[in-house]
Image (tube, grey):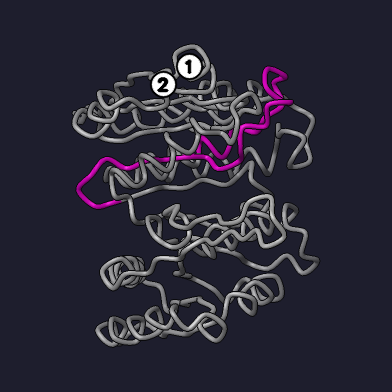
Amino acid sequence: MPDYRIALIPGDGIGPEVIDAAWPVVAKAAAGDDVTLTTTRLPYSADHFLATGETLPDHAFEQLRDASDAIIIGALGDPRVPDNEHARDILLGLRFKLDLYINFRPVRLWHKRLTPLKHAPHIDLVIFRENTEGQYTGRGRSEGIGTPTEEHISEEVNTRSGVERILRAAFEWAQREGKRRITMSDKSNAIPFQRIWGELFEEIGSGFPDLEREHRYVDALAMEMVRDPGRFEVIVTNNLYGDILSDLGAGLVGGLGLAASANLHPGRPGLFEPVHGSAPPLAGKNVANPMAAVLTGALMLRALGHPGPAGRLEQAVTTVIAGGPTTEDIGGASGTTEVARALEEAVGS
């Protein structure tokens, strides 16, 4: 009977209550396949930072790296912390230190009433976002602050190895999952240094002759995702564009309350995160949607090699969205705990 070591970092705002509501649902689905999830809860959050000055100390990182099979992290962000220093150090720190170069974001329409698009198309795509380079490395400088010539420069980093591995991951996943088309997006017509994406896309893609490959500039892709999202299956792009497009995708299928993500590097513990944000004004009001956290648990179970319980979680979400109860963000009037109980019942025994 598999027993996985799962680190929980519930986070800030609505993070703890959403993780606490969703986790019994995930654990029940896993138990249905005799999979045990042994959890260790870690305190790293705004409260912890304000009390101790710690964001994510070295010993905690080593524990996450060496003694965890997966990490579940709740929403991070708190207005009491200037510039959300703790959130940046914890979330981006884990992504960079564990070299989790794949940010995997499914965009799936669970029920046609959730999309703002009047024709309610079939939407089922995934976005592979490069997760360790681009403009998120923090490289840059500020000059002349407070003067008429004040200037802020943010550097974008695209290495051959970094671009190559995210492209290869997207192609391999598409082939393994029986997809037909993969779309790469950049803005190389205006930013020449992004041309490495197109060059490597063609080079690597030639090794996958059964997959149709296409290129879209990111502005055109954003328009096409709204106009005809059903034609897309796999999108691969850089860190910044992936961040933007994945939230656009979430808006097409019901909002961030249904948005799950996985940060992956094969052979290393993955970081799994509902991406709805910490929403401090809603904390403690029992109104947050737990479905993104449940779907994040499904991504974790699938990554650990257990598609059966992952599929049961996804089916439970489909069932509860169709018949209720649901939270206000997707048209209902129920609370976090009530929705979580319904999901747990829908998972079955």
Rendered location of residue 87, percent (x, y): 50, 34
Characterize the magenta stretch by its predominant secondary structure. loop
Relative to 39, 147 lies left or right? right
Residue identified by numbered label 1: 48
Image depth: mark 1 or mark 2 in front: 2
Q: Is residue 272 magenta?
A: yes
Left or right, residue 29 beside residue 303? right
**Real-space CA distance between mark 1 and mark 2, rounded to the nearest whole angstrom:** 7 Å
Residue for point 31% across, 47% down: 303
Question: Helix, strand or loop at disc 2?
Answer: loop
Q: Residue at x 63, y 51 (%)?
A: 145
Task: Locate residue 232 relative to residue 7 in the image: left or right.
Answer: right
- Up/down of 77 relative to 187, above or below: above
Q: Quadrant of residue 98?
A: top left
Q: Quadrant of the N terminus?
A: top left
Q: Which residues are magenta?
A: 265-294
**Three-letter code, disc 1:** His
Query: What secondary structure is marked by label 1?
Result: helix
**Image x and y of residue 241, in percent:** 54, 65
State the image coordinates of residue 285 (x, y, percent, origin top left): 72, 19
Residue 28 position (above or below residue 316): above
Q: Mark 2 = which residue?
A: 54
| Observer-nearest of 317 and 69 | 69
Amino acid type of the residue tagged 2 in the rendering: Glu
Q: Dividing the image into 4 quarters, which one contains the C terminus?
A: top left
Residue 177 numbered tag: none
Cβ–Cβ under 8 Å for marks 1 and 2: yes
Q: Quadrant of residue 196?
A: bottom left
